[in-house]
Amino acid sequence: MKSFKLYTGNEDETKNSDNNSTTVVGSSLVGLILLAGTIWYFWGSGFERQVSKNADTIYSQVSSDAVQQYEITKRNGNKTDICVQAGLVSAAYLQAKDEPNYQKWKQIENSDCSNSGINFK
């Protein structure tokens, strides 16, 4: 026995509706993948590595600036100013966790402060 389908005129709309639902599902899936990638980046190690890299660059720049300021002070300042500036340079290297330069500048600080009559011992 054959079955007959009643034509209602909505057959094209049904096909378009199926295509639209496939497009919506595909778009949602792509969006979900992008969201998951973003979450992984920020809560994973990617964001932390970027922040650490930027912090290292900043610490390096601060230390370099402090050394330049020391050199200006050494040319133009008095002995007390030079002592204070040497202390700021050593503090910048301490902040950067650069132990070799910290030790070097602590010696310079001690020498400059001794020359100005300031002794920490």
Image (spheres, rainbow, N blue to C red):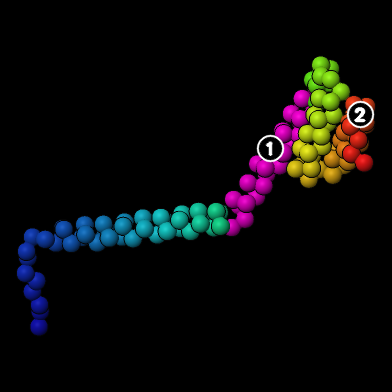
Identified at 26% across, 57% down, the residue is: 20
Identified at 18% across, 62% down, the residue is: 14
Q: Is residue 55 above or below residue 48?
A: above
x and y, in percent, of residue 112 in the image = 90, 29
x and y, in percent, of residue 92 in the image = 76, 37
Quarter location, residue 5: bottom left
Mark 1 — residue?
A: 58
79 part of magenta stretch:
no
Residue situated in front as seen by the camera: 24 or 100 = 100
x and y, in percent, of residue 27 in the image = 36, 55
Identified by mark 2, the residue type is Gly
Q: Secondary structure at mark 2?
A: loop
- Give the label, 1 or 2, closer to the camera: 2
Residue situated in front as seen by the camera: 78 or 103 = 78
Label 2: few (<14), some or many (≥20) within 10 Å?
A: few
Quadrant for the C terminus in the image: top right
**In the rendered image, is residue 104 in sight?**
no
Label 1: few (<14), some or many (≥20) within 10 Å?
A: few
51 part of magenta stretch:
yes
Q: Is residue 47 above or below residue 96?
A: below
Q: Which residues are magenta?
A: 44-69
